Image (cartoon, rainbow, N blue to C red):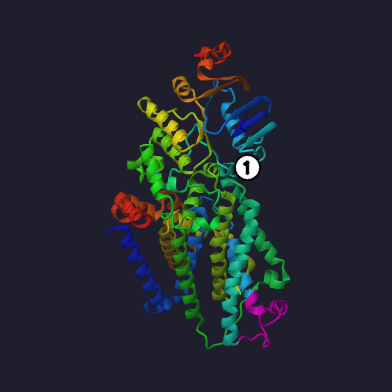
Amino acid sequence: MSRPLLDVRNVSKAFGGVIANRNVSLQVKRGEIVGLIGPNGSGKTTLFNSIVGYHPIDAGEIWFKGEEISRLRVGAIARRGLLRTFQQTRIYGRMTAMENMLISLPERKSGFFDLLHSRHSVGIERAKELLEFVGLYSKRYHYAGDLSFGQQKLLEFAMALINEPDMLLLDEPTAGINPTLINGLIDRLRRANEELGITLLVIEHNMRVIMNLAERIYCLAHGEMLAEGKPEEIRNDPRVIDAYLGAH
Amino acid sequence: MNKRLVSILAVVALGLLGLFGPWLFPAYVSQFSKLWLFIVLALTWDLVGGQMGYNSFGNIVFFGIGMYAAAVVQVGLYYPVAAYTAAKGGGTEFVFDAAQFYTGLAVGLPVGGVIAALVALLLGSLILGMRGHYFAIATLGLAVAAGELASGWEFIGAGSGMVTPTPPDSIDTTILFYYLSFALAAVTFGFLAWLYSTRYHLAINAIRDDEDKAEAMGHRTTRNKIIAWALSAFFLGIAGGIYGNISKFIDPIDVAFNGAEIGVWMILMAILGGMGTLWGPVIGAAVFYITKELFWTFLLGWQRVALGALIVIIVVFFPQGIVGWLKERWPEIFGPTEEEMEAADARKGS
């Protein structure tokens, strides 16, 4: 059996007396699209933050591409090809959409002197392609802060793509997106996976989206891993229905 | 008229003003020397405070360090520094001929810049791990600490200060330091214009807009911040070296590490002109310096009150600065159009 691209082993994280994650394990193989669901407060975003190094974990190990990353900092993990997007969109608001793209080119192989190249000399065509890909080409010279929330989400997704990550952690990618555009976004996520080879781990509350998109799904409840399986298995798992789906 | 043409015309006009200033305004050459240096102060502060969003109240430290370092090198190349400062720079044994004076400047000014930059690298690696406001607070005490340290260090004259080398009468220092100041302002402006055309500019803007995001995208944010501060310190150090020579006497509190005046002014000049822009600090420095000189001339006794009122007006009515206001008022002249930006991309990128 091939080694997982991301291997989360028995991770625990508490904030004071509140246990956000307890002995959580999760594996994602290269090329997969995996979903992560759970009720509000179940510890999904905390797990994301732990994986990408936003806070130290209390126990357990996190491995990425065969290397332990549990103690690495955010930037070092990102440079190894593991990126995330945020539930509340994070973009550079006072820069144009194009500038947001250009400064999101991968830095993992470049030194400081590569930053001294003209801002127009690297990645312009790729930035245009990806802005076209997410439907923001016509907005490329708009300040990112002036874009609608949904457009900012799409821009953040495009910024992640131009960084050429091996794996992308998406935190509620469809939240705030116009329902009529959601199918298009699902299609783009799938194409990013198939055409660009980016492995995806997706937190999503929209059950239609996650059941349609993911090959496997993990379900968290009260900080613990409740279930794992194919979408139809998760949909029919009485524990999941009780803890999560049944709550809706 | 587009933005590019406006910029070219402004550069040409400033260049001509700088070159022919001593003939155009012969009575104000010294004041113009300081104006060019104030432009350097505003430009270098804005690199860190405006472009990167890190408000430093400690940049005056690099100005003072450059001032002392340049003076020490100018003296130390030919005489024991301790003996020179103990004699308060006086005495017949401390004479500098023209060659010694020029050599001292040629070596001392760059050394002042380099030492200031090295100190910025060291300080930056200690405190630039802090974010935003915490960094600003950490820099507040730097100037006070540096002034106190200099006041207690006998080698550089301690509280009695240090006289800079006196040139022979054959050298017209007013003109010399005018052109040195102008050259430094021109080089600093040109360097920053180039730097702001690179990807590094986007990298420090990203820190300003969302440092967490920049880090999450793999940027080496701490390294980029430290380099920005060191670049700022380098030019500030040279400016300090020139300013010390213009002043002829370096007092540790009132000249070198004068955080309450020059240290604050460099921030105000950038805010007044427009933070995060190339031209803002230039315009801000000019407007501020000329206004300040007028206050000192015509409102003597009330000049600090008037300056305080000006500061309030700047912060309340010009939060975006003069350049920000111009961009909003006349975007067709001062703000880039989509077509211009697209054309620039097409020309340079493909």
Q: Dot 1 corresponds to which residue?
A: A73
- For the magenta stretch, what is the residue range? B72-96
Q: Residue at x 57, y 87 (%)?
A: B98
The stretch drawn in magenta includes residue A205: no
Q: Work out whether A21 lies above or below B6.
A: above
The chain that hosts pointer 1 is: A
Location of the N terminus of chain A (image quadrant): top right
Indicate the amino acid at tag 1.
Arg
Q: Residue at x 44, y 62 (%)?
A: B194
On the picture, is A190 further left or further right than A217?
Answer: left
Residue B302 in view in this figure: no
Image quadrant in which you'd find residue B326:
bottom left
The stretch drawn in magenta includes residue B81: yes
Q: Work out whether B213 lies above or below A178.
A: below
The furthest residue to the front: A1
**Residue A208 placed where, x, y %?**
44, 20
**Residue B207 placed where, x, y %?**
52, 48
Q: Work out whether A177 lies above or below B226.
A: above
Image quadrant in which you'd find residue B3:
bottom left
Give whichever of B216, B8 is nearer the camera.
B216
Give whichever of B172, A77 is nearer the camera.
A77
Give whichever of B260, B68 is nearer the camera.
B68
Residue A130 in view in this figure: yes
